[in-house]
Image: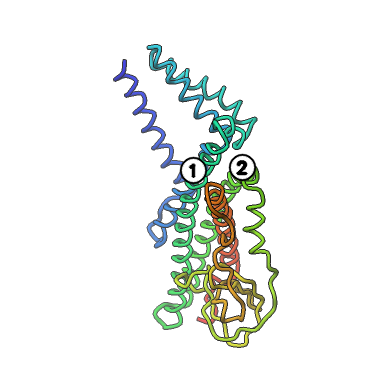
Amino acid sequence: MRSSFRRSVASITAAAMLAGCTTQMGRIGADDGRDACRAYVVQLDSTGDFYGEDILRGAAIGAGTGAIAGGLLAAATGRRGSDILAGAAIGAVAGGVIGGTAGYITARQRQAQNQGALVQAVGGDLANENRQLAATQLAFNQLVDCRVNTASRIRADVRGGRMARDQGMALMAYQRDLMRRDVALARSINEKIGTRGGEFDTAIETLAPGTKGQVQARRAAAPQPTSARVSAPIRIRPDGGSAQVGQLAPNERVTVRPAEGNFAQVETSSGVVGYVPASSVGVRGLGSPTAGVGGRGQDGEFRQLAATNIARRDNFSESVQNADRLAQGQGFELAGA
């Protein structure tokens, strides 16, 4: 009986893996062999699978627990494999009703024996989510850098006479289409992140009121007009190693607002939006978005985890917007080539 059950589980697992490959192909399309950034597309899509799982959602907490309990109960009573699967399904339905109507934080509250255990459980979920958000952000950063750098090489080849202008325009149009698909993929992932984030926000406000307001208040400065003090590369994100999307000229008029680290976000008169060193436009960077949030002990550690989660969600959403603006604007034009 056990070997038969194991074969059933193996068959289900293999089918699920095959279905996953088929689903991914449907999301990102087939590889035509021309996309130099394809590996980053696959990586981004793979990180997005995490957010499609409902494990941190209220229904999933109840359903997952119920399914395990139902399956174990059937197995413990010596039932056949089909009965074990049926028991798991029944448990999942019962658990899903509880979790789905109560929500994530309520389900966690019911599981926890005391407030300390609740904070620890939600903190663990936040830490796991934060690790995944970092992986998703890295994958998207690498993909966007690859696209922008590819476009820059096409411009350089046309400008240097190594490529005909017509060929350059065709390749640039191809890269623009790919970038728009990348943005659509990232937007779909961001929507899932937002859904989960809404549930985390409720939990955070319950356990650490005011944390979200503290984080977002640091980014609330309105853009201000100013003139650039010095020339500086305009980059796709506040990172000196990220792809360059423009060049700031001395005394150029821009609108500016402080950004993370020692950077500022600028928008030029021609519509280029990106990041430059804060000192080049006479402002001070924001430093860490979680600075000043936290404290000592379990509450302080939880607030730091919560602030990091909020900041990383906001950062990914902003990076998707920036990439979309680039794809729709001047990021994939031959310009003066």
Query: Closer to the camera, 264 or 188?
Result: 264
Horizontal placement of 80 versus 27: left or right?
Answer: left
**Scheme by which the image is coloured:** rainbow
Instruction: Tell me the kind of residue under disc 2.
Output: Ala
Query: Closer to the camera, 278 or 135?
Result: 278
Are there few (<14), some (14-19), or many (20+) residues within 10 Å of tag 2?
A: many
Q: Residue furthest left?
A: 3
Residue visible at 52% across and 25% down in the picture: 92
Q: From the top left corner, tell me how far across and down residue 64 is, in percent.
A: 50, 29
Q: Residue furthest front?
A: 296
- Image quarter (top left, top right, bottom left or bottom right) of the N terminus: top left
Report the residue marked by disc 2.
Answer: 203
Report the residue marked by disc 1.
Answer: 124
Are there few (<14), some (14-19), or many (20+) residues within 10 Å of tag 1?
A: some
Horizontal placement of 222 versus 334: left or right?
Answer: right
Instruction: Tell me the kind of residue under disc 1.
Output: Gly
Report which quarter residue 6 is drawn in: top left
Q: Secondary structure at mark 2?
A: helix
Q: Is residue 50 above or below residue 145?
A: above
Q: From the top left corner, tell me how far across and down residue 19 is, in percent.
A: 43, 37
Q: CA distance from mark 2 to mark 1?
A: 13 Å
Query: Closer to the camera, 38 or 249?
Result: 249
Of mark 2 and mark 1, the one earlier in the sequence is: 1
Q: From the top left corner, tell me how far across and down residue 276 is, in percent.
A: 55, 76
